[in-house]
Amino acid sequence: MSAAPKKMSVGLGLGLLGGILAMAAVAYSWDGELDSITNVAFNLLMATMFFATAGAFASSAPVAGKTIAVLAGICVATVLVSMLFGSTFLWLQIILMVIAIANVAIAACPTVIRFGNSRLA
């Protein structure tokens, strides 16, 4: 098994950054009332998907190459659903969408797919 491509480290960092920003959105969206649970849930879902994507980019994760792209695509979908429901600031959701799309672009690179597949053998 060869050394992990630098793109994997960038994807890992972007996933962690997106997860941290989504967790900050969770903290901001909770106002102590039961009505805020929908916003909290969508922000937690975004954070979970960003952290899952970051974990898939880890060099020791036993995840197939195309599965990384699927996880990153689901991350884009959760951010989009969160935007539709308006669970947090629009500018923060735009930043999270840019990070998620960058993760999809990184996950679709042939070197990342090849490296992901080599970890399974």
Image (cartoon, grey):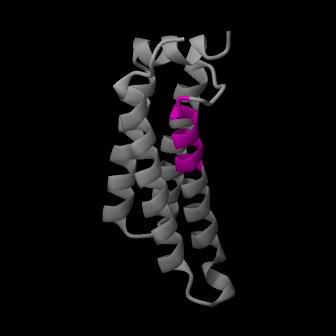
Percent across and percent down for residue 36 are: 60, 80
- Looking at the rendered image, the quarter that the C terminus falls into is top right
Which residue occupies 52% across, 48% down?
50
Which residue occupies 55% across, 63% down?
43
Percent across and percent down for residue 46 are: 55, 55
Task: Please identify the residue farthest to the bottom as the structure is shown.
Answer: 32
Residue 87 appears in the rendering: no
In depth, the one of 44 and 117 nearer the eye is: 117
The stretch drawn in magenta includes residue 51: yes
In depth, the one of 69 and 37 nearer the eye is: 69
Percent across and percent down for residue 100 are: 42, 42
Whether 38 is drawn above or below 92: the answer is below
Name the image quarter holding residue 67: top right
Which residue occupies 32% across, 54% down?
95
Q: Identify the magenta region.
A: 49-59
Residue 43 appears in the rendering: yes
